[in-house]
Each structure stands twice: as structure tokens, then as C-alpha cells.
Image (cartoon, helix red, strand yellow):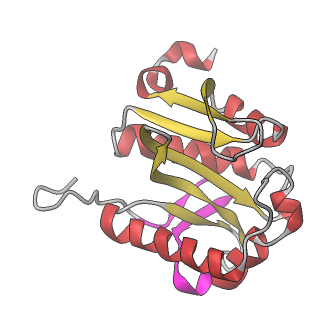
Amino acid sequence: MSASTSVPIIQHPLQTHRLLLRPVQADDLKVAQAIHGDPQTNRYNPKGTASLETTSSNLFNWIEHWKTRGFGYWAVCDKEHPEKVLGFGGLQDGLFGSRTGLNLYFRFAPDAWGKGYASEMVEAALHLAFRTLERNEVIGLVRPDNLPSRRTLERARMIVDGELDDVPGQPHSLLYSLSAERYLSPESFM
């Protein structure tokens, strides 16, 4: 972080082997709605698909997080074709009941599923969290029946360490976490 501000200085966009991770922007609304309003991407979401109004509000909040914190959720793009948004994901400060933490989020278009993009984005997010932002913990919230997302978190060495009663009348969501100590430990890669 710079000495004159509490907003970290992070170079963007970030690149991985196959992805370009850039801050979300207002003109991502159409693709954000296509992804968040798709019944397939909401199969495990008891609240159902997002309305255009909800997506617009979420996108505004994501942009504000970037402005005030210097990091946040990315538009996850194909590195070879950066105009193609595959999904959204990254890190944002979150509240989980009475617990606060750095929330790891991802949602991809169905045509991007099964290609390892989520895992690749998650690894970049964890690197940012622990090596750049120097945070102590990352948390992922997932519905218990969302096995694909659970496997992605588990491949990233995250473990279930709690539950959250966040949807009345539904099974509790699972809280996955990864500590900086575990992430930085050579033994965690075995």
C-alpha cells in the first residue's frame, strides 16, 4: 500500500496463463445480466435468477468497492480474446453473519464451465489476497449441493469451517476458508 492512502496499488489487468482479469466497469452490465440472469448459473441459488435491477445494483457496488479499496471482483476474460467475458469473480470484503472476511466469489457463463477457468481465477485471487494484500484469511460461501463450486474451493486447499443460515427455510450455506498460514505453507501443496 502507498504511504499516503489505504488503497493498495495493484497493477491491472492481471493475467494468468489463459485469463485476463480486469476491474468490472459499467458497460459490463449486459454480460453481467446474461450470466447472473441465466437459470443454469443459478441452479443452486434458492433466490433464483437476478433481475436487471439487482444485477445493476450489484455491479454498482462492485465498482464502488474497486474505487474505495483498490481491488474487487473482476470481469474474467479470455486472454486471447479480451473482449469475451467468461464470467465474474475475485475478492471483496464481506460479512458472513457476525464474521467478516475477504469473500472469494465466482460465476461463469455455462459455455465456460468445465475448462478450469474458475480454478485458474481462484489461484490468482488467492495469490492477490495473501501475497499482495497480505490478508490473513479468505472465505468462500457455497450452497451444500453445489458440488462443482465446492470442488473448485477444495482444489484450492480451502476447507469447510462453518455454516451460515443465510436463506430462510433452506439448508445452511457452507463457509470454506483458507488461512494465509496454510496457503503459504509448503505442506499444503502435498
Q: Is residue 52 magenta?
A: no
Q: Is 51 located above or below residue 173 in the figure?
A: below
Image coords of residue 79 (percent x, y): 66, 67
Q: Is residue 17 visible?
A: no
- Horizontal placement of 184 versus 79: left or right? left
Picture residue at 45% right of the left edge, 24% below the top: 184
Quadrant of res 129: top left
Quarter of the figure with the C terminus: top right
- Horizontal placement of 169 versus 187: left or right? right
Q: The magenta stretch spans which residues?
A: 12-28
Picture residue at 56% right of the left edge, 46% below the top: 104
Quadrant of res 109: bottom right
- Horizontal placement of 184 versus 89: left or right? left
Q: Is 92 located above or below residue 111 in the figure?
A: above
Q: Nearest the camera: 129 or 26? A: 26
Q: Nearest the camera: 68 or 78? A: 68
Quadrant of res 40: bottom right
Picture residue at 41% right of the left edge, 60% below the top: 71
